[in-house]
Amino acid sequence: MSELISLRGVAVLTDGHESLCDVDLDITEGACTLVMGPSGSGKSTLLKVAAGLIPPDRGTVSLRGDDFGSLGERSLLAFRRTNGFVFQDGALWENKSIFENLALPLQVHFPELGADEIRDRVLAMLARGGLADSPSLRPAQLSGGERKIASFLRAAITGPSVVFLDEPTLSIDHTKTALITGMIRDLKAGGCTIFAVTHDPHLASLIADRLVVIDAGRIVVEGPFDAVKRDADPRVRAVLAQVLGEISSFDTDLLDLLDGGSP
Amino acid sequence: MLARLGRWAIERARGTGYAMGFLAQVVREILLFPRRRQVAFRVLVLQILFTGIEALGIVGLIALAIGAVIIVEGTTLLPRFGQSGLLHQILIVVITRELGPVLTAFVIIARSGTAIATELGNMVVSHEIEAYVSVGINPISYLAVPRVLGVTIAMVALTVYFNIFGLVGSYLVSQLVTPTPVAEYFRNLLATIQARDVLSTLVKGLVFGFIVSVVATFQGFKVKVAVTEIPRAAIKAVGQGFVLVFLADALITLITYV
């Protein structure tokens, strides 16, 4: 498997302080790379930088060897056509209906499909996400979990080959978590490259190939999931304990959590 | 003191450069708009509807009031100085050349300028702009250009509408107070109005519409992270819109009539 996205010496400044600092990372094509770290450690920023949504203040981000900043409009559009992004807060377009939220990426990237085909695809996707009764609703009329699902469906509707997921299962109930987890596993089974931020050890145990542990804007360790989760380095253990401690009982075994045990 | 002044100057220069960059992007995307896939066409139609159609009532009312006041005041005051014949000249100068485009611009700044800055600012804060970028939609092409074109088209149409209401409709209103023979009024009006008056009002409508919409979209996009920035963006859209409209008005008047 080759490197799809590479970050070299990346730094991002937010109001004078470094949200990311000297980050070197390769995202392998076809693999699932998860990022874990405490709140405010720069995970979402890392995700957005890798997706080309935030330009780094220092360093380079390259897509198959080509610097994002020097990509032409056509190359960038071709990349966007094949990727999906799920924001932590959903970021649905509030002035559009749920149907329109899902239809717009198809209208932009696949206008040749025609209105009827786009309508059929959107309705089928909504049915898959359990939102078949909500196509004409506005995002504000949905619950938090439904918004998260709608956001995921919008990212998945173009059949992406790479998805960026920012806490896809955060603050949603067990049923909806299972639904989203199932759809992520389907993407992975289809060969989709997944780069995700999560605090969910169950999701991590199901989909992760590689794990990045980040703290205070710096990568603490990065490597195969099984190796990182067994890393004995006290700093790695401390960061993971901090991350997983947020959702676990005080003395739950970290390894057990990352192996798929219940928190 | 000197250091603070220097920092202020650098910030202003940086801000101006950023604004010029935004303006260049908008102009570029306007030129490319016909060639783009027309998913933004609906946004354009909605903007014309909001800015143009929904403002017909208030613009018509202001035009009627201003026109009627000028006619009533003119027919009362001017004969005292033996200058009754100047009424039509004053009507053309005030309504067609100056107040028509300027007052229409004020209405559009107050309604659409604030609405655009607020809407776009909200979209930035709720990460909707990033969501557009993530699916490959250029926010300037999809969000700014239809609003700029919609406001500019509506502004030109509303300026013409203001002129019609100000010159024709106000005559009807003024008849309730000061009856004037209809044939005489329109004959004198047509004899007074010149091609450059019409051209001036159209150019002002076009330029003011562009200014108001570009300023409003720029201020909306300038919002960064906090909802408290949104009302400030709306206030800046109004303030800068007023100042730039006055400056452009003076410039166009100088070019046309001096």
Image: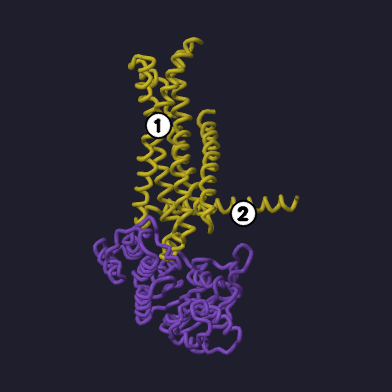
Q: Which residue is mark 1?
A: B162
Q: Residue at x 44, y 26 (%)?
A: B66
Q: Are marks 2 and 1 in contact (CB under 8 Å)?
A: no
Q: Position of residue A79 (x, y in %)?
A: 42, 70
The chain letter under disc 1 is B
Q: Position of residue A199 (x, y in %)?
A: 48, 77
Q: CA distance from mark 2 to mark 1?
A: 39 Å
Q: Residue at x 50, y 81 (%)?
A: A249
- The residue nearer to you, when weighing A53 against B235, is B235
Q: Residues within 10 Å of mark 2 (few under 14, many from 20)?
A: few
* Foreground: disc 2 or disc 1: 1
* Left/right of residue A95 with respect to residue A64 in the rendered view: left
Q: Which residue is mark 2?
A: B14
Q: Identify the mark nearer the N-term, 2 or 1.
A: 2
Q: Can residue A31 be spotted in the picture? A: no
Q: Is residue B194 above or below residue A221?
A: above
Question: Mark 2 belongs to which amino acid?
Answer: Arg
Chain for colour purple: A
Chain for colour yellow: B
Looking at the picture, the colour scheme in use is by chain
Residue B175 lies in quadrant: top left
Q: Position of residue A65 (x, y in %)?
A: 50, 76
Q: Residue at x 39, y 46 (%)?
A: B150
Question: Mark 1 belongs to which amino acid?
Answer: Phe
Q: Residue furthest right?
A: B1
- The residue nearer to you, when weighing B130 against B156, is B130
